[in-house]
Amino acid sequence: MDIRVHAVPTVVLAWLAVGASWVGLGLLLRRPFRLAPPGLVGLFVAFWTGWAAVLAVLQLWHMALPVSPITQLALGLAGLVGLALERRQLWGLAVAGVRCAPGPLAVLALALIWMANRATGPAQFYDAGLYYLQAIGWNTAYPIVPGLGNLHGRLAFNSSYFLYAALVHVGPLVGKGLHLANGPLFFALLAQGVAGLAALATGTGPRQLAFWSALTLAPVLYLLFGSESSGALPILHLHGASPDEAIFAVGMALSSLLVLLVLEPPAPEAGAAGYLRAAAALLACAGVSVKLSFVAYAGVALLVIYGLALREARPRGLDGWLALLGPSGLCVIVVLGVWAVRGVILSGYPAYPSTLGAMPVPWRVPTALVLSEANWVRSWARQQDRHWTEVLGGAGWLQSWLTTMSPLLSRPIALTILAGMFALATLGALPRRGPLWRALLFLLPPAASAVFWFVTAPGFRFAGAAFWVLGLGLVICTVEGLGPRLAAGSPFAAVCLAVVAGLLLYVAPVRGPLLLVPPPGSEDGFWALPVAPTRPYTTASGLELALPATGDQCWATPLPCTPYPRPELRLREPGNLGGGFVLDPARAYVDIGGSELPPAVGAPGDLGVALPTGWYPYEPEPGVRWMQDEGVILLFTERLRRVMLTIELASILGPAGFVEAGRLHLSQDGMPLAPVELRVGEPASIVLELEPGFTVLRLRSAGGAYVPVEILAGNPDSRRLSLAFYEIEIRDEQ
């Protein structure tokens, strides 16, 4: 059986080279703190700080140059310098590992080969075709492109992870970024877990960190084997270059630093705590640059870390404050400052799809499109396949959300609830001025992140590691609460190992097939990416775009490709895609899915109008548009205005057939308006006061909606109909 023998060694070698480079970079960052040579824990910290530093460097690099093999070479050489400077210590650690822990090393070697096999699998994430590959393509083809969000809003999300994915997408393994990006992060987490399990069994190293690292094996293995799927294969999280997986890894790594700084006794070595705080700040800022939804976890984690530092030793004088806050402030400036500038270049906003801090640049994405993008993110996380006007603003989505919750979310939430119950029963045994309040501090970042997640976008993709960290943290609290009731030494370690085993059984990580077989026709052992059929589209300025022929996925279609054709889109510099994109600022927009007025709808040029739900397509013959039970008219305006809505009625369907008169019920943003009397062939009008932003109008016939085939003999129409309109016109009141 062919199990991609030729692809697997390629992936393994690439991961080892990438991981070693990141460790080397992290060791370089460690040197200014003048610490003793690193141990195993120090190497893990170096990996994560090195990876975060790569994101920071790539953000700066891409301001002037595309990501290319030269970028790989420069970062690789820097990593080699870091490894060379610590070569004696690294060699000593390697020799000690082979002598003292051959079993764990053998397990990790086999796991690395197995992971590489899974990474060669198919692309299963929808967003990989929607925009991941397109973002990677732009990062490798051009330096940062002003106004790229005007072409495709999701390209303005400004995730630094796609710069990292672009880095492994070029060079010797060109085009394989989706297969390579996630692996080093997950292998680092797996290695930490195995090392923690070994330390827990032998009683070596920091006890809390060992227990925590061993506990993290449960979620890591759950994702490595693949989460539940209705298809032939589980969902393979090693493939896809998804920021969702990256933010999970960052959350788990940052939680390990929190364990060292909050739960473990203070390190005796001078400068060690300062180094760990700086590492946490760098990783937290990198996480925000990867995915904006990480901001709550990162922000609260840093507040906890520095609040604890100030409580233990208040700085004296300016030098003391600079020593405490200087490294972290530098991280914020270099990582998040540059990230915000990049956001302005891509969209005109520092933190798209938020409109806060909008800058007056000519390529700024229209406000309506930004707000619409944000509403779609919030809505899709609650209930998919419905327009955001039907989801946001109420709690009707909650039941559907609960019944369709992904196991990726339900498992850690269930663990959190169960562990919380046990923790409450055992925490009374903890001294209130010691472990208890420190445990609460450790739980604060994931708890705050969970609240922020539920309020903003409660989808599993945005949760990251928050619920896993919260649940595993409560498990530690439970075991610590049991500690005083147990004998010291082996029995306590045995309890910890038993808890780890129980967690592994709870997540049931083993799901087949254990080895992936390449599809027929696979020449290099990698599962081929889907190909998107496209059709040409030319804007009013002559700009030629590729549009998906069906659906909204471009995959690796040559640039520029977008599922959102906008006639007003043009290049800032004729003939130069890298010069950026702009939209006509005088044109009104209302939703990301369309930019033109619907047929038979009239409105001023600066008033955006859409008919998102409750309407059938316009029928040129006989020139009408039918409404279902309830039709929604979505409006967007930049200013306060008074408008007249006029409708010309073509037909009214009643319970016994067509009628000549009726009544229209309207509501504006949930507030009922005065009913409007209707008569076929006669216009009916109502005056509306519009506030800046979106206005949602809901129209419903007082007589209800009916199916013609059920009430009219000989009529084959099986649609549910209420009112038919010749025209809907909105004009400003003088």
Image (cartoon, rainbow, N blue to C red):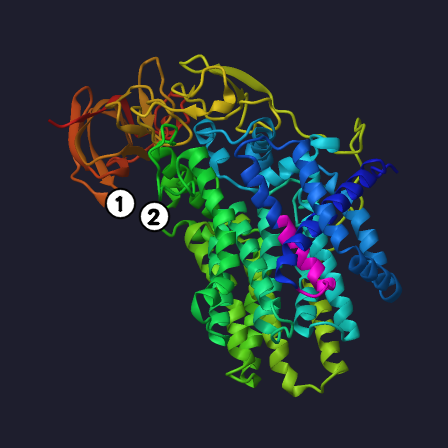
Picture quarter with the C terminus = top left
Instruction: Report x, y in % for residue 560.
Output: 53, 22
> Is 223 on the left-hand or right-hand side of 718?
right
Q: Is residue 263 left or right of residue 697?
A: right
Location of mark 2 (residue): 393
- Mark 2 Cα-neighbour bin, 10 Å: few <14, some 14–19, many ≥20: few
What residue is shown at x 59% (from left), y 38% (from top)?
163
Residue 442 located within the stretch drawn in magenta: no
Nearer-the-camera pick, 630 or 137: 137
- Determine which quarter of the picture holds residue 587: top left
Considering the whole magenta stretch, tell me its main secondary structure. helix
Question: Could you tell me how far apart the alpha carbons at marks 2 and 1 are, in whole angstroms?
Answer: 9 Å
Asked whether the beta carbons under mark 2 and mark 1 sit within 8 Å of each other, the answer is: yes
Three-letter amino acid code at disc 2?
Gly
Locate the N terminus and report the quarter of the image it occupies: top right
- Taking the spot 54% from the left edge, 74% from the top edge, the residue there is 439
Q: Which segment is the magenta one?
A: 35-51
